[in-house]
Image (cartoon, rainbow, N blue to C red):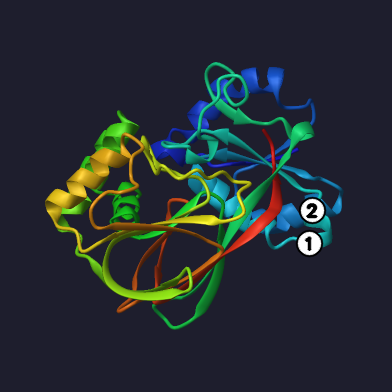
Amino acid sequence: MLILLNKYSNNGKGLKKWEKFRPELEGKHIPSEYTVISDFKNFSACLRREVKKGERFLVSAGGDGTIHFLLNQVMQIKRSVRRDVVLGAIGLGSSNDFHKPYSTAKHKNGRVLARMDYKNAIPHNVGQADFEDENGKWQRKYFVINSSIGIIAQANYLFNSKEKVVRWLKSRWAEGTIWYSALKTLFVSPNVPAKIKVGGGSYSTDVTSLSVVINPHVSGSFCYDFNLSPQSDSLGVALCERMGTLARLRTIFSLARSKFSGLPKTRSWRTNTIEILPSSPTPLELDGEVYVARRIKIKLLQGVLKVSQ
């Protein structure tokens, strides 16, 4: 077992939480021999070395951003080898959307979230995002939870920032920090003019928020009401367009109650591909990590990853 530990997850509490829960994890989930790596800079070389030696169980110990990093490393592994790799996760982060919906029986050992039952691994969808960055260079990144542009991406950017209020609040109340980031963003973030190609149609609009989801949980208690799972044959697309402050507020409070379908100024689709063409470079959020993109092409890679239960 190779564990990627993000010591700085959950506003710097990752290492402390790992040390606190490690004895319990070792007693229930982790074998007697395992390797922990916290050096992200040199992780690629370590991963190649361990995989070459036969290691196939790779675990993210951190938040959703740590899973995103590990996923993108895993997707670089040769396909014939990757099909035997199993991704596990220990939730040390603030939101831990990868673990949702929570199941006490399957995912929680009483105190820390853990998806570590690699012997009963299940297939999991992956999203592939190709985008042109602000320098005109095309990049390819993968996501395993969701992606977005608009106010959700802006809110994630603020949540991950070093703003004084965010730093103070995150160390005390993660859910409150999510709400603070969401509410502040909805008052100041402008709509994003964009052309969207989805479901056989092409739409020009002003995007308030556009989410492309594998898992309908987007942050904290916010959740779309899609009948969707990581094993579905499509992605879920949720568009909020041309919204002012009141409509944004209504939508945010509805998402906190897992309600979206039928709200004013919204549309939704089920699709395998979507292309997004913003009029200018805009933040693109993938599993909570934020990039800047000009053109975005997203497609579903169905069942290409195996994950622990």
Question: Is 209 in front, or is 135?
Answer: 209
Q: Is residue 1 above or below residue 152?
A: above
Residue 70 visible? The answer is yes
Residue at the right extreme? 53
278 on left or right of 36 = left
Q: Residues within 10 Å of mark 2 (few under 14, many from 20)?
A: some
Q: Is residue 287 above or below residue 79?
A: above
The residue located at (86%, 48%) in the rendering is 54
Rounded to the nearest angstrom, the CA distance separating label 1 from label 2 is 6 Å
Mark number, residue 306: none
The residue located at (73%, 53%) in the rendering is 47
35 on left or right of 99 = right
Q: Position of residue 2 (x, y in %)?
A: 72, 41
Q: Quadrant of the C terminus?
A: top right
Q: Position of residue 94 (x, y in %)?
A: 41, 36
The mark total stands at 2
Q: Amino acid at mark 2?
A: Arg
Residue bearing the label numbered 1: 79
Q: Are marks 1 and 2 in contact (CB under 8 Å)?
A: yes
Q: Position of residue 148 (x, y in %)?
A: 40, 58
Residue 253 location, quadrant: top left
The residue located at (76%, 38%) in the rendering is 1
Q: Amino acid at mark 1?
A: Arg
Residue bearing the label numbered 2: 83
Q: Position of residue 191 (x, y in %)?
A: 22, 65
260 on left or right of 30 = left
Q: Element under label 1?
A: helix
Residue 218 location, quadrant: top left
